[in-house]
């Protein structure tokens, strides 16, 4: 696939065949309780039920399965690295994952458990990418970008393909936005197959890199993105993901960390799932948006992952957690 152009719906269908039997076709279910509370039909696309509890397996396996190199390097806040380690192990490849010094311990342990060499370096995504590039140069390994790659986007787009197959009629989909790979793939699939449906993204207020880039018409890099949702705070999006959102995304939301925590509590209490902060952001957006005309009556929330730290979940359930000490 041309690395400078967005994937097509046919590329996404090809990716679906490639990852079949590795990534799960995750459930898409209505939550009657959330529907009642929020006054519209609320459906949950449960990517937290993937084998590694996060959607990233879709793109990582689609990409790595096509690489000739036996050595793979990734830079990640956690979930992409987990997907790369898992996929590399299945494909008999060696992997190295550069994670931030502040990475959630459970994510770091899980990456190592799947056989990857874990390198802790820096705080921001740009730090990790520089370190990963250095490792690639020294070892000849192939670098797998977390979002700005058409094969990664096509893999993530299989989530959108499933949504259109599982629910024939829906008004909108809300997708969390980190680097933009997931919303890029989902929006391509949805706009190709359900063009009347809308696609919205959601970012933390401390990391609105896609919104700023869309307004500027070019990539905007944040100096110090911050949020409890560690999967949504790369310093910038990519050229491809910006292009996909410019073409296919109908709007963006910003949510506070307090809003994300409230959404996490609601999902645990009412839907009986254990989402990570990033996966709770779509519900936080829906909770803050009361304009039914924009989102419509039937809304799909992409619960992108469930790799939440035990410490955060314990404090959340006891309602001790506050934003100031929840990172």
Image (tube, grey):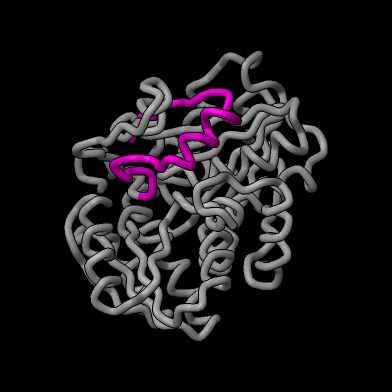
What number of labels is visible? 0
Residue 187 shown left or right of residue 260 in the figure: right
For the point 72% across and 45% down, the residue is: 163
Q: Nearer the viewer, residue 244 or 114?
A: 244
Q: Position of residue 67 (x, y in %)?
A: 52, 73
Quadrant placement of the N terminus = bottom right
Q: Nearer the viewer, residue 208 or 95?
A: 95
Q: Is residue 243 magenta?
A: yes
Q: Position of residue 251 (x, y in %)?
A: 53, 23
Residue 4 shown left or right of residue 250 in the figure: left
For the point 32% across and 35% down, the residue is: 207
Magenta region, residue range: 231-257
Q: Is residue 108 visible?
A: yes
Q: Is residue 35 visible?
A: no
Is 14 situated above or below 317?
Answer: below
For the point 76% across and 34% down, the residue is: 194
């Amino acid at each position: 696939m041309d690395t400078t152009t967005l994937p097509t719906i046919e590329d996404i269908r090809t990716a679906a065949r490639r990852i079949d039997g590795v990534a799960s076709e995750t459930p898409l279910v209505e939550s009657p309780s959330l529907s009642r509370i929020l006054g519209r039909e609320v459906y949950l696309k449960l990517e937290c039920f993937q084998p590694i509890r996060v959607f990233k397996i879709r793109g990582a396996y689609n990409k790595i399965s096509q690489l000739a190199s036996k050595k793979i390097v990734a830079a990640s806040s956690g979930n992409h690295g987990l997907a790369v380690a898992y996929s590399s192990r299945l494909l008999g490849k060696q992997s190295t994952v550069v994670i931030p010094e502040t990475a959630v311990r459970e994510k770091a342990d899980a990456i190592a458990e799947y056989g990857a060499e874990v390198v802790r370096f820096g705080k921001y995504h740009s730090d990790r990418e520089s370190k990963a590039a250095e490792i690639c140069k020294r070892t000849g390994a192939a670098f797998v970008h977390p979002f700005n790659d058409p094969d990664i986007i096509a893999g993530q787009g299989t989530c959108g393909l499933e949504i259109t197959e599982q629910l024939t009629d829906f008004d909108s989909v809300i997708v969390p936005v980190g680097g933009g790979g997931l919303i890029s793939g989902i929006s391509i699939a949805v706009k190709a197959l359900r063009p009347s449906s809308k696609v919205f993204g959601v970012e933390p207020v401390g990391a609105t890199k896609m919104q700023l880039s869309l307004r500027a018409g070019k990539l905007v890099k944040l100096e110090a993105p911050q949020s409890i949702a560690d999967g949504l705070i790369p310093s910038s999006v990519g050229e491809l993901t910006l292009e996909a959102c410019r073409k296919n995304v109908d709007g963006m939301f910003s949510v506070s960390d307090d809003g994300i925590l409230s959404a996490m509590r609601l999902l645990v209490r009412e839907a009986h799932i254990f989402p990570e902060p990033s996966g709770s952001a779509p519900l936080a957006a829906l909770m803050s948006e009361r304009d039914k005309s924009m989102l419509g009556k039937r809304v799909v929330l992409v619960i992108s992952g469930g790799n939440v730290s035990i410490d955060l979940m314990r404090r959340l359930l006891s309602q001790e957690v506050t934003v100031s000490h929840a990172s």
